[in-house]
Amino acid sequence: MKFTSKRLIRGLSTWALLTCATTLWADPIWHCSRTGNTDPQNVADASEQFSLASMNAGPDVIGVSIRDLIDIYSGVPVRVGALPLSACFMPGQDALSLAALQSLGLQPSAIQALARKSSIVQSNLHLVTDEQQMRACISRHFPAVGYLSQPIDTDKVLPCF
């Protein structure tokens, strides 16, 4: 009986650790602003407005490429049609931020410094503190990109990678 209860405790402990580790180290899901055009005719018109490479999940989400993500988070201005692209990010010590930005080959601490240093970059890089603010930032700063731990589909935000 003792042997079985020890195995059960070990099994539950292992399961708990794996569950926590999976939650803490979840892959970031890149999200983009929606264009707001859900009518088939408007979607076709909107696709002509955006000149960036489209790798999106839906026809009414802005199109951005991995290169665009690297550029915007590096402080290089990126335009979507005639509008400047905004990028939302969380502080560098956040695990989701580390995973998202390092997947682009970037260091979160350097991005924070860029956001503080230049008024041009500051207007396009927006520091947020949590995922709720990340969703709000992407919604508010059209066109914008950001990352979340779970896919979110709203009238303003949709996964794009």
Image (cartoon, rainbow, N blue to C red):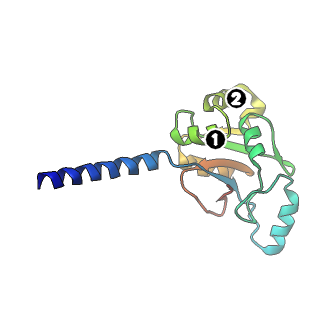
Instruction: Determine which quarter of the picture holds residue 89.
Output: top right
Q: Position of residue 159 (x, y in %)?
A: 65, 57
Is residue 29 visible from the viewing direction of this image?
yes
Q: Position of residue 102 (x, y in %)?
A: 62, 37
- Residue 32, relative to residue 120: is it above or below? below
Q: CA distance from mark 1 to mark 2?
A: 18 Å
Label 1 neighbour load within 10 Å: few <14, some 14-19, many 20+: few
**Residue at (67% x, 36% y) in the render:** 105
Q: Amino acid at mark 1?
A: Ser
Is residue 141 visible from the viewing direction of this image?
no
* Residue with the mark numbered 1: 103
**Residue at (71% x, 65% y) in the render:** 58
Q: Secondary structure at mark 2?
A: helix
Q: Is residue 40 left or right of residue 144?
A: right
* Residue with the mark numbered 2: 114
Q: Position of residue 148 (x, y in %)?
A: 57, 50
Residue, far bottom: 40
- Mark closer to the observer (1, 2): 1
